[in-house]
Amino acid sequence: MSVRYMQCNKSFLKEQEAAYGATAHIGREKPSRSKTMSKTIRFQVALAAVVLFAGTVSFAQSAGEATYKAKCQMCHGAKGMADTGAGKAMKVKPATNPEVKALSEEKMIDAVEKGTGKMQAYKGKLTDAEIKDAVSYFRTFSK
């Protein structure tokens, strides 16, 4: 067969497919519709599973992180460095400060519950578990 004949045959088949749809597979085997649909459905289900899994992984945050972001971040900063306007104005010490690093978890929890310096008390505004989780999250910045 000549190359010219094969090119003409391919273009002829394309025209036939465009004009007649499913019957244009003359001269070659056409996959069954159920096989094609199965593959398509499997692909779509797998894609949906990957997207859902990726979404839950990327948006997952600890309870302490959520509490810290809602109640503490405005003064202590996103990474505990007290680099916000409010943190600088109130002279908040960063998590990396040796005095802050030396505090035990219990003393930090007590400071959050009762307030210290210009920091307001959170006893009664947050549960004990929320305070403990937020303090644990804050302590990760000093490591």
Image (cartoon, rainbow, N blue to C red):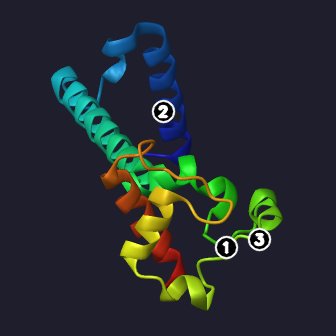
Alpha carbon of mark 2 to alpha carbon of mark 1: how far?
67 Å
| Residue 31 appears left or right of 129 | left
Distance, label 3 to label 1, CA atoms, is 11 Å
Please report the residue visible at 31 percent of the width from the left and 13 percent of the height from the top.
Answer: 23
Query: Could you tell me residue 111's position as x and y percent?
Result: 49, 66
Q: Quadrant for residue 77, please give it.
A: bottom right
Q: Secondary structure at mark 3?
A: loop
* Amino acid type at mark 2: Lys
Q: Quadrant of residue 8?
A: top right
Residue 10's tag is 2
Q: Mark 2: which secondary structure? A: helix
- For residue 91, the mark is 3
Q: CA distance from mark 2 to mark 3?
A: 77 Å
**Could you tell me the amino acid type at mark 1?**
Met
Instruction: Using the image, determine if residue 112 lies above or below residue 143.
Output: above
Q: Earlier in the sequence, mark 2 or mark 3?
A: 2
Return the x and y of residue 139 as percentages of the image width and height: 46, 75
Q: Position of residue 63 (x, y in %)?
A: 37, 52
The answer to whether residue 97 is left or right of residue 130 is right
Q: Residues within 10 Å of mark 2 (few under 14, many from 20)?
A: few
> Which residue: 53% across, 82% down?
142
Mark closer to the observer (2, 3) = 3
User: x, y percentage for residue 123?
Assistant: 43, 49
State which quarter of the image contains the N terminus: top left
Left or right for 27, reference 88: left
Q: Residue at x 44, y 48 (%)?
A: 59
The quarter of the displayed image where residue 116 is located: bottom right
The one of 3 and 20 positioned closer to us in this rendering? 20
Type of amino acid under label 3: Lys
Look at 44% across and 24% down and name the residue there: 13
SS type, badge 1:
loop
Instruction: Read off the residue under disc 1.
Output: 81
